[in-house]
Amino acid sequence: MRQILYAMQFNGRAAPVSGSSNVLKAATSAESCTLTTAVRAEGVSASVQPAPGDKAAFESEVTVTGESSFIESGTIRFGEGNHQLRFSTVGQGYLGTSADPKLRHGSVIWRVEGGEGQFSGASGLITSNFTISDTGEVIDHHFGVVFAP
């Protein structure tokens, strides 16, 4: 088994599914990038910079299960090839208020349930730390540790 690590910033939208009061459809994408974190005497700083390469595309269905909880399942496609993984929530995700009144802030852990191409037979975990605006705009930071044959 080889270990595949990735960190990406996904941007897009989440919107209610027609005819359902508790289901959202999320669609985001991410450019290839370099994430840099520096710790210095004045504190911590970070940046996300574009890098050569293709995009990743994320799609999921989010089911709200309580005032601040949800479950989710979906796919992430990496690049133009057939490299796609499938995931679902470990336990429940959390979505609550944030210090910015226009944003809600949440986090979730997903279990990798296999996939196609590079991710055929894959397993692993992905953490997501995200914000969603009052207009449905999503910024989602992923950190994945995926094991692939």
Image (tube, rainbow, N blue to C red):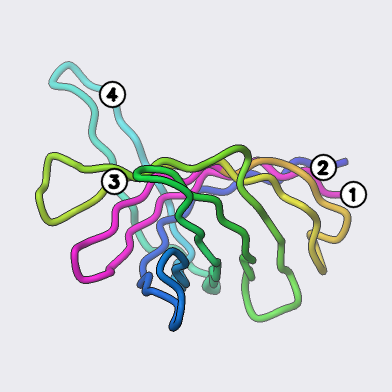
Residue range highlighted in magenta = 127-149
Residue visible at 82% across and 42% down in the picture: 2
Residue visible at 44% across and 59% down in the picture: 33
Quadrant where the image shows the N terminus: top right
Binning the other alpha carbons within 10 Å of mark 1 as few (below 14), some (14 to 19) or many (20 upward) gives: few
Label whose residue precedes the other's in the sequence (2 or 1): 2
Which residue in the protein does label 3 denote? 105
Based on the picture, tell me whether residue 25 belongs to the magenta stretch.
no
Percent x, y of residue 61? 54, 66
C-alpha separation, residue under disc 4 versus residue under disc 3: 24 Å
Percent x, y of residue 39? 28, 24
Label whose residue precedes the other's in the sequence (4 or 2): 2
Label whose residue precedes the other's in the sequence (4 or 1): 4
Q: Select label 4 or label 3 by which is in front.
A: 3
The reply to whether discs 2 and 1 touch (Cβ–Cβ < 8 Å) is yes
C-alpha separation, residue under disc 3 versus residue under disc 1: 35 Å
Residue type, mark 3 in image: His
Percent x, y of residue 144? 59, 45
